[in-house]
Amino acid sequence: MAAGRGRKSFKRTITQPFVDFWESKRDYHLTILGMLTVLTFALIFWAIAFFTIFSSNAQQEANNFASYTAVTWVGVLLSFILLLFVMPEFFHYLGVRNSLVEMLETDSRAELQRNKKDLDEGVKLLAGAWPARLESKRVELGMRREMPEGMKLPAGEGEAILGGWFTTKNSRYAERFPDSNLFKDPGINKILIAFTSIGFVTFLYNALFGLARETIDSSRNMTVDFTAIAKGAQYNATWAPHVDLIGGMLIIGFGILLFMTTPAPDHSKDAKSDVIETEEE
């Protein structure tokens, strides 16, 4: 019994500093988990690209691709760990956040009071500005006279550059697939933005400036030719700038996918303006 208590005490001594550090960053839990989720997708994307394209490149000796094999396997292992432990936690936090957003959109005191337990637990989990958002909603609905002392809603919230893009629930994906709640999730949209941005920038940079070398000592100024790789050509890179068929399709494809994450046009405004013009006539 004493040995068991000793092991628990030793384990607590080891893990407590990490627990305390994690708790001290509670305001940023969702952001940190989101960044790690994006990192997971980036590592998986790199591993697929490395083992299917770069490691088999005819100029790999000049580009020293073989030296990245061990690092890539470490990345695969890390992405597997993140998939198991980080992503479920991220989607849990994301679900709580989206539930809070939905519950705080109500104009009913009774509904807000009915969801009191879920709201209190949610703002405690996410912390940051969420307690202030909840109290602001209570003040708005007349459930309390004023904000608690020392608490205020962040000024200019949601008005940052590109803020509407990152927080939109009505992206072009959501408009294209209206029956899917997945694309109405701002967190999912952020992941899509990050993933497609990485793909678009990577392939565009390869086409314009090159990711490959001609010799070991030369700079990376040769474009990896994906069409040549698909055909099994001996040389899989050419002088940049160069756009091959498959590479160009990948750039266009990632560009379209990135564009689809932007907020959809508000057709209601156009409809209102048309009504106004009709009335004036």
Image (cartoon, rainbow, N blue to C red):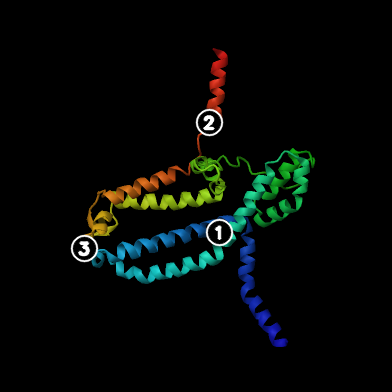
Question: What residue do we see at 74% from left, 49% from top?
Answer: 115
Query: Looking at the image, is 38 positioned above or below residue 279?
Result: below
| Spatial CA span between label 1 and label 3 | 40 Å
Please tell me in which quadrant of the rendered image residue 273 appears.
top right
Place of residue 29 in the rendered image (x, y in percent of width and height, measured from the top left): 60, 58
- Report the residue marked by disc 2: 267
Q: Nearer the viewer, mark 2 or mark 3?
A: 2
- Report the residue marked by disc 3: 215
Say the numbered circle drawn on residue 266. none
Residue 70 seen in the figure: yes
Q: Are the residues tagged 1 and 2 within 8 Å (C-beta)?
A: no
Q: Are the residues tagged 1 and 3 within 8 Å (C-beta)?
A: no
Place of residue 45 in the rendered image (x, y in percent of width and height, measured from the top left): 41, 59
Q: Are there few (<14), some (14-19), or many (20+) residues within 10 Å of tag 2?
A: few
Residue 147 seen in the figure: no
Q: In this view, does 8 lie to the left or right of 86?
A: right
Q: Are there few (<14), some (14-19), or many (20+) residues within 10 Å of tag 3?
A: some
Disc 2 is placed on an element classified as: helix
Disc 3 is placed on an element classified as: loop
